[in-house]
Image (cartoon, helix red, strand yellow):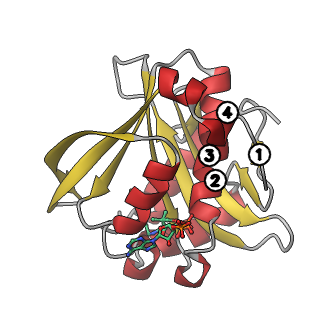
Amino acid sequence: MDIYGNRIFTKRLQLRKPEKEDIELLFTWSHSPEAYGKYLSPERLKLEHLQDQLASGALWNDREKLFLVELRDTGKPIGTTHYWQPPGNNETVVISLKIALPAERNKGYGTELQKFLIIQLFSHKKIKNIEMYTDINNNGQQRCLRKLGFELAKSLTYEDQQVQRTGHLFRLTAERYNSEPIYHYHYE
Ligand SMILES: CC(C)(COP(=O)(O)OP(=O)(O)OC[C@H]1O[C@@H](n2cnc3c(N)ncnc32)[C@H](O)[C@@H]1OP(=O)(O)O)[C@@H](O)C(=O)NCCC(=O)NCCS
């Protein structure tokens, strides 16, 4: 299924466009420190803002998409992932994600969803890089990124909802994507 449809399937997950019925859940997660974990700050979005963003297509267009992530077998929503192209930059896509239910972390879902989203992005967009920011102490995410072939581009301080964080910018180039076995051989 390609990214211009409304869904991406992985072995165990479905990534899909959020609908009106999902706004309540997105709103609840947006205010929940547990959903963001220790290394991300809750965005605390206003309900009306979320409704407007979904209705206007601000979160689902050619340059940007927010997916709800669900387990395929039960349909249970477990998190979100978001990608966007920074303004004025057609060569780069930035991704963020959260497995919002702590009990569903460390089961390989984070790695699986990033892998398949990355395959879709490099297959369908003329981009040269995918980038991700992580807090310097987010060892779980950094482990995922290394498995996915990302390299440390630079360390920096950045602002995350008014919290100053020290973090790393990781980058996966198209060249590295093409030579990284994890994207081209599916052992699972
Ligand atoms: C970070 C996150 C996306 C990772 O997804 P996940 O499904 O939990 O991760 P996975 O199970 O795919 O893989 C995690 C890997 O990190 C390892 N890991 C987990 N916690 C770790 C820690 N504290 N130190 C070192 N390694 C750790 C796991 O052992 C696993 O590696 P392995 O497969 O070699 O055993 C998820 O935990 C999450 O959403 N956290 C909250 C929000 C967040 O931090 N988002 C990322 C922002 S950049």
Mark 3 near mark 1, Cβ–Cβ under 8 Å? no
Disc 3 to disc 4, how far (Cα)? Answer: 9 Å
Disc 3 to disc 2, how far (Cα)? Answer: 5 Å
In the image, taking residue 130 as reference, residue 107 lies left or right, namely right
Q: The disc labelled 1 sits on which kind of residue?
A: His
In the image, taking residue 77 as reference, residue 33 lies left or right, namely left
| Residue 78, quarter of picture | bottom right
* Residue on which disc 1 sits: 186
In the image, taking residue 124 as reference, residue 80 lies left or right, namely left
Tell me if the residue at label 2 has its CB under 8 Å from ligand 1: yes
State the quadrant of the C terminus: bottom right
- The disc, 3 or 1, on the residue closer to the chain's N-terminal end is 3
Disc 2 to disc 4, how far (Cα)? Answer: 11 Å
* Residue on which disc 2 sits: 113
**Front-most of residues 162 and 172:** 172
The crowding category of the residue bearing disc 3, from other C-alpha atoms within 10 Å (few below 14, some 14 to 19, many at least 20), is some
Disc 1 to disc 2, how far (Cα)? Answer: 14 Å
Residue plotted at (32% across, 66% down): 138
Residue plotted at (56% across, 78% down): 101
Residue plotted at (17% across, 53% down): 159
Mark 2 near mark 4, Cβ–Cβ under 8 Å? no
Q: Which mark is residue 120?
A: 4
Q: Name the mark nearer the viewer: 3 or 1.
A: 1
Q: Position of residue 54 (x, y in %)?
A: 58, 47
The crowding category of the residue bearing disc 2, from other C-alpha atoms within 10 Å (few below 14, some 14 to 19, many at least 20), is many
* Residue on which disc 3 sits: 115
The crowding category of the residue bearing disc 1, from other C-alpha atoms within 10 Å (few below 14, some 14 to 19, many at least 20), is few
